[in-house]
Image (cartoon, rainbow, N blue to C red):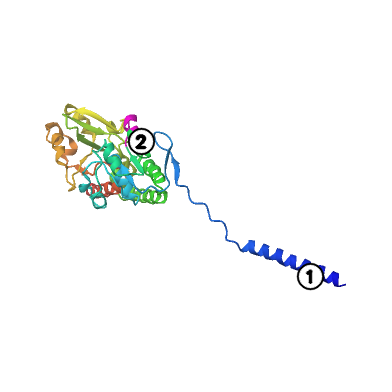
């Protein structure tokens, strides 16, 4: 009988020990969640590129990209060109002390390398020799306005920079602003035809087509272009001053504005000509300056606000 009791006691001890082992295993710390990947593959105009998952040292390898980087809540460590001071809030303050890494479209590779970037961003078409120089320094992403819409560029760059929610918020605001203008000024927009022109600086002038970024934003707000502009299959077309008669069909003429919001002085080459002065829109006092070079939702907001004010005077 005692032997039976001893066996039962031994089994009970084993069961207790086993239960304790199970309990101990159950109380052990859960394995740590895997760390997020340090990099990912981004789709770019020049094919897939491995980029940091959350880049923090971005160099903008052309003038325009810096605006979108700021809109997305980041501050680049290198920018192209030196003319951001007149860009207005928030860009002037955010970019004033950022080192320049070259001119507006051709960055200096040595200056780029000195900025120690973890990502280089280009928002204009990029030739292979320049791309190879830049990608030897850091992952280089080319997403160009020359082939994509403002919305497409914003979405793609938002993804590359790990800022997709911010990009979506910006585009919702853009759509809301454009829709508000269409609604408020429906009557004026139905009857007016617009044209956007500027001098080339070499004895001619540019007519801007429907896919030019500024006009893309204005068309989203309901602007209709005069026939010659609407028919352009490319973003710009150069003409001689003898062809200023093409603008006779425009009810409203748009020209570039300066930092003060007035007609930029460089337009004088165009606006001083006798043929310009004879155009119906000029004689009717319907020449308006607009901000030039929409390259981000924030710069589009500035343009749309100016357009909204302009339409208020044309009602």
**Residue 252 x/y as whole percent:** 22, 40
**Residue 259 x/y as whole percent:** 19, 47
Q: Which residue is mark 2?
A: 136
Work out how far the residue at label 1 is from the one at label 2, CA to CA, in angstroms. Answer: 74 Å
**Which is more N-terminal, label 2 or label 1?**
1
* Quarter occupied by residue 220: top left
Q: Is residue 97 left or right of residue 5?
A: left
* Quarter occupied by residue 241: top left
Tell me, for residue 305, which label it has, or none: none
Magenta highlight on residue 135: no
Q: Which span is picked out in magenta?
A: 124-132
Identify the residue shown where x is 40% and y is 42%. 156
Nearer to the camera, 169 or 56: 56
Q: How crowded is the residue under tag 2: few (<14 C-alpha within 10 Å), some, or many (20+)?
A: few
Q: Which residue is mark 1?
A: 9
**Residue 107 x/y as whole percent:** 27, 37
Magenta highlight on residue 127: yes
In this picture, is 93 found above or below 8?
above
């Amino acid at each position: 009988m005692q032997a039976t009791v001893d066996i039962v006691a031994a089994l009970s001890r084993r069961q207790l020990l086993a239960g304790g082992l199970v309990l101990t295993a159950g109380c052990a710390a859960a394995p740590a969640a895997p760390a997020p990947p340090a990099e990912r593959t981004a789709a770019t105009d020049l094919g897939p590129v491995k980029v940091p998952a959350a880049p923090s040292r971005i160099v903008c390898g052309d003038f325009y990209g810096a605006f979108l980087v700021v809109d997305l809540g980041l501050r680049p460590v290198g920018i192209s060109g030196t003319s951001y001071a007149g860009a207005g809030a928030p860009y002037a303050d955010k970019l004033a002390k950022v080192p320049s890494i070259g001119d507006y479209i051709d960055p200096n590779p040595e200056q780029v390398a000195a900025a120690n970037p973890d990502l280089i961003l280009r928002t204009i078409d990029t030739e292979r020799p320049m791309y190879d120089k830049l990608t030897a320094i850091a992952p280089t992403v080319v997403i160009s306005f020359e082939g994509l819409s403002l919305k497409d560029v914003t979405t793609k760059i938002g993804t590359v920079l790990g800022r997709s929610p911010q990009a979506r918020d910006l585009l919702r605001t853009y759509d809301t602003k454009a829709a508000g203008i269409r609604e408020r000024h429906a009557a004026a927009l139905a009857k007016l035809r617009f044209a956007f022109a500027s001098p080339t600086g070499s004895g001619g002038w540019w007519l801007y087509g429907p896919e030019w970024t500024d006009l893309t934003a204005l068309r989203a707000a309901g602007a209709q272009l005069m026939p010659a502009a609407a028919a352009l299959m490319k973003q710009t077309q150069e003409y001689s001053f003898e062809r200023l008669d093409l603008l006779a069909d425009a009810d409203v003429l748009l020209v570039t504005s300066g930092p003060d919001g007035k007609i930029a002085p460089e337009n004088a080459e165009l606006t001083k000509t006798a043929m310009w002065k004879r155009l119906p829109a000029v004689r009717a006092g319907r020449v308006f300056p607009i901000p030039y070079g929409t390259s981000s939702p924030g710069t589009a907001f500035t343009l749309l606000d100016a357009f909204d004010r302009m339409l208020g005077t044309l009602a």
